[in-house]
Image (spheres, rainbow, N blue to C red):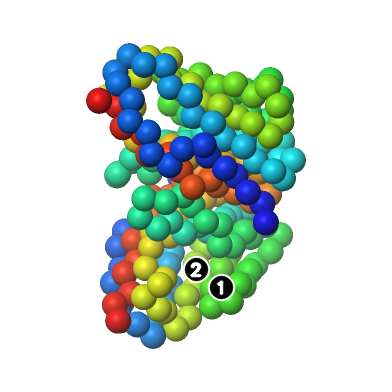
Amino acid sequence: DVKVTQSSRYLVKRTGEKVFLECVQDMDHENMFWYRQDPGLGLRLIYFSYDVKMKEKGDIPEGYSVSREKKERFSLILESASTNQTSMYLCASSWTNYGYTFGSGTRLTVV
Amino acid sequence: KQEVTQIPAALSVPEGENLVLNCSFTDSAIYNLQWFRQDPGKGLTSLLLIQSSQREQTSGRLNASLDKSSGRSTLYIAASQPGDSATYLCAVNAGNNRKLIWGLGTSLAVNP
């Protein structure tokens, strides 16, 4: 079974902290994605990567950065966490034009 | 610009009913369409992927169809069970940019 593993299910961080969310996939997928999901707004793409060290902005990249140093790992970084970044964060991976596989999500609360 | 709509937003049915969830999209030029299930507070589980050249896909009690010309996909759930209660999302791969366009989902409750 393809697996996408997110390092934490729940995180509580303080305003202004630097936050790292980690995602690892084991299927040699070239594409990896970070979404956030909020009630009434659906899934919104933050960043995606189609190759090692390559990244593209999604629909809401402000306040976030990403890192992909190895093919299997894609990290989302909140440079200075704010309360409006409290959300469910979902990582996914895929081969191009094939189905997505999602991780189990990280519920981040910024206080 | 591709847009994806799922109607209804919520659905409540008695156990055992056959039901249909709808997904419509505005641009027929798609690569594929994927249906997902999401349980409360959890990640998304892929149910079915339909490539643009296909008309339908089946997995157990689930059947998804795709009609590109009319911009519609349906997810058919046979003999619904309380364990089917979840939010069902459809997403369209609208081009060679690797990104998905998402509907807001249908929240399904199957009552015993």
| Image position, residue A74 (x, y; %) | 60, 29
Disc 2 chain ID:
B
Specify the amino acid type for callout 2. Answer: Leu
Vertical position of residue B107 compared to residue A45: above or below:
below
Asked if badge 1 and badge 2 are on a common chain, one would say yes
Image: B19 above or below B48: below
- Dot 2 crowding, Cα within 10 Å, few <14, some 14–19, many 20+: many
1 and 2 marks in contact (CB < 8 Å):
yes
Would residue B23 be seen by someone viewing this image from the given angle?
no
Nearer-the-camera pick, A49 or B8: A49
The residue shown at (71%, 59%) is B53
Using the numbered discs, state the Cα–Cα distance from disc 1 to disc 2 in whole angstroms.
6 Å
**Mark 2 = which residue?**
B75
In screen coordinates, is B27 left or right of B98? Answer: left
Query: Where is residue B95 drawn, in percent x and y?
Result: 63, 40
Q: Which residue is pictured at 46% across the width and 38% down the height?
A: A8
Q: Residue at label 1?
A: B63
Hey, which residue is sitting farthest right in the picture?
A28
